[in-house]
Image (cartoon, coloured by chain):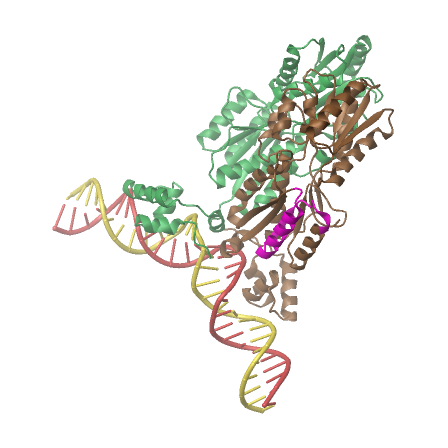
Chain colours: A brown, B green, C red, D yellow
Amino acid sequence: MKKNPVGIKDIALHAGVSTGPVDKVLNNRGGVSKKTEERILKAIEELGYTPNILASRLKSAKQYSIAALLPEATPDIPYWKEHERGFADAMNELKPYGFQIEVHRFHQNDKQAFVKQTASILENNYDGVFMVPIFAAETVKFVQRLKRNGIPVIFFDTQLPELPNIPFIGQHSFDSGFLAAELLDKSVSGSSTILIISLTQEQDNHLHFTSRENGFKEFFKSKQRSIIKYESTLANEHIETELSGLIKASPLVEGIFVTNGIQRVAPVFSPKKNHILIGYDLIEENVKYLKNDVIDFLISQQPYTQAYAGIQLFYDLLILKKAINKKSYLPIDIVIKSNLKYYNHIGHGG
Amino acid sequence: MKKNPVGIKDIALHAGVSTGPVDKVLNNRGGVSKKTEERILKAIEELGYTPNILASRLKSAKQYSIAALLPEATPDIPYWKEHERGFADAMNELKPYGFQIEVHRFHQNDKQAFVKQTASILENNYDGVFMVPIFAAETVKFVQRLKRNGIPVIFFDTQLPELPNIPFIGQHSFDSGFLAAELLDKSVSGSSTILIISLTQEQDNHLHFTSRENGFKEFFKSKQRSIIKYESTLANEHIETELSGLIKASPLVEGIFVTNGIQRVAPVFSPKKNHILIGYDLIEENVKYLKNDVIDFLISQQPYTQAYAGIQLFYDLLILKKAINKKSYLPIDIVIKSNLKYYNHIGHGG
DNA sequence: AACATAAACGTGAACGTTCACTATTTAAAA
DNA sequence: TTTTAAATAGTGAACGTTCACGTTTATGTT
C-alpha cells in the first residue's frame, strides 16, 4: 500500500482544486482558466507528479491505431514482408494499452496505388503512421496533410532529404557500405580488384543504394585498391550473361559488393569459387546462398527490429508522451554462415 | 467502452459464484471447494477469460524484487559492470508494474563472498534471481534452496552441466568459437597457421572458454589448417614476453583467436601488423584496440541485452505467468571498427 | 439436537485515472 | 442592477482487479 508516487489527487489538493481541472491541464483538454492552470502547473512542479499509466489506460477506452504504409513484397523484392512479424510481436506486448496496427500495401512501382493508400490513411484518422517514403513528391504532400491533422509519422528504411526532420528508424546506409568495404578489405588479398554491382530498377530507393556505394568508396579513398563497377537496369537473364562475361574477363577481381538485390547476382557464382561476395538482406533466397557458400557476408536491415522499435516509439510518443529521437540507427549486423541461425527466426532480443 | 474481453465478473456470473472465489482460483490462493473450483475452471474454459494486467497491477500493491548475483568488475575483467545499464533500462520500462532489482556483487575468486551473498539473497526473499554460476558446488546448493522456496533462477553467461534445466540467457559459446573460426578462415591466406590463445585465471568460467575453443577447432576439423596453441596462467608481463617470443618464432601465424581476456594479449601486437586478431567482449580497453586496428574482430556477449532480456523474462514469468524458454541464446554479433559505434552505447533496439 | 469450529463463499472498498455531468463563478447584455 | 449565457470548476461513477473482512454453509463433538 505504498502511496509514494504523487497522483492527480495530491496535486489537486495542493493546488486547491479538484481532480477535474487537473486532468484537463495534464491532457490539455481546455476549459481551465489561466490562473488555475498556473496554480496546477506550479503544484505539479513542486510535488513532481508521476502519472500512473496503468490507471489511465484502465479507465480510458481509447484505442490507438497505427497505419503502416509499405511496398508489397514481390518475387524480386521479398524484403518487404519481413516487417510483419516485428509488428505482430510488439503489438502483442502492447495489446493491454489498446494498440492496433493496419498495414497498407502498394506496389513498388505503382504511384497511383501509393496515393490511393495515403488517401485511405488520411480518411481513417490514425494516431500514427509508419511509412517507407518511396515516392518523394507524393510523400511530401502526404506528410504535410498528416502534420496538419497532428498525426505523427515515422520513416522506415529510407530518409527523404526534402523532409529531414521526420523521425527515422533504419540503417545508416553510408556506414553500412563503409563496413562492407572494411570486411572485403580484410578478406581479399592486397593486390586484388574489387567489383561493385548496382542494379537499379524503376522505382528503387536510389538514394539509399547510392549512399551504400558512397560509403563503400569512402573506405577505399585512402587505400591503394583498384575498383571497377557494373551497373545495369536489365532483366535478370541478361544480367547473368553480362556479368559472367565480366567476371571471366577480370581475373583480378576477388571481392564483390552488391548494393542491392544480391539474389539476382548470386546465380553467377559457384560455391567453390574464389570470390568474396557481400550484399544485403536476410531474405530466404539469400539465406540459401549464404548456406551453400555462394554469398559470404550479408548485412541485415533488420526489418523485424525496425518494426518492433517503431511500435515502441509510438508507445513512447502516444502513451508516455515522451519526445522521440529524430534518428534511430540500428546496429549494422554482419551475418555469415555460422551466426545465421541467430538472426533468422529470432525474437527482438538482440 | 468495449466490453469485449471477458473478465473476472463475467466468469463469476457464469459459474454462479461471486468474484472472490474466481480470484482465488485464478491465483491459486486456496480456500475454494473442489466443486466450485471445477465450475469456475469450466466457466473459464468456456468463456475464455483474458486477464487485465492493468487492473490487476493497479490494485495489487505487490512489489516484485529481483536479485542479481554477479562478479565484481576488476581491472582485468571489467566486463561485469556492463549489465547494469540493461537492468536499469528494463527496470525503467517496467516500473509501473512494481519491479525492482538489487545487484549483489562478489569477487570473482572469493568463494566466501559468493556464499555470503547467496545467504543474504535467501534471507531477503526475492521473487527471482539472476546469477552467473561461477562456483559450481555452491551454486547447486543455492539453487536447491531457492527451488525449495519456489524462487525462479536464471543463469547468465555460463551454464552449469549439473543444473541443465535452469533457464539461461547468453551466448552459445561453442557456436561463437565456430564463428570466430569462419571469420579467421576467410581473412587469412590458405597456407597460414592459426594460433589459439587461452589465458585461464584461478576461478574463470573454464567450461565457457573451453567451449569456445572446441567450437573453433570444430570448424577446422574438415579443413587443412595447422593450428598451434598458447596457454598460460602467468601474470600479464610474463605473458607478453613469452608471447612476443612465440610470434617472432612463428612467421606462418596469420590468424589469432583469443578465447578470453584479449586485452591482456593485445599489447604484444602493433597496429601495423600482419595478423588478424579476434577475441571477445566490447569492454573499453578492447574498443580502444579495435579502433587503432590492433584487434580486428570482437564478439560481444551482449551484457546489456542479457540484462534487458533477463528482466523481460521475469516479467513474462511473474506478471504474465507465462512459461519461459529454457535456453535463450542471443545473436552472436560481429563487431569491427566500422560498426562499433552502433554496439557501444546503444539501447536494446537490436 | 445443540453447539463449536472450520472451511467456503460473498461483499465491497480500494487502486489512480477519465469523463460525462452538474454546480458554480464570471462576464456580458439588458 | 438584474438577467442570461458562457466559461470554468467540482462531482462521482466507472474501468477490472485484489484482498481484508464478514457471512454462510458444512463438518464434527457432546
* In front of the other: A102 or B339: A102
- In which quarter of the view is residue A151 placed? bottom right
Q: Is residue A339 visible?
A: yes
* In front of the other: B264 or B144: B264
Q: Relative to B43, say whether B68 is above or below.
A: above
Percent coordinates x, y for residue A148 in the rendering = 67, 59
Percent coordinates x, y for residue A46 in the rendering = 65, 60
> Left or right of B279: which side holds B148?
left
| Quarter of the C terminus of chain B within the rendering | top right
Percent coordinates x, y for residue B139 in the rendering = 53, 24
Query: Is residue B340 inside the magenta stretch?
Result: no
* In front of the other: A42 or B7: B7
Question: Which residue is at 58% across, 39% downward?
Answer: A86
Q: Relative to B108, say whether A96 is above or below.
A: below
Q: Is residue B330 visible?
A: no
Query: Is residue A123 inside the magenta stretch?
Result: yes
Counting the numbered discs, the total is 0
Percent coordinates x, y for residue A183 in the rendering = 76, 25
> Left or right of A268: which side holds B275?
right
* In front of the other: A139 or B249: A139
Per the rendered image, the range of residues in magenta is A108-137
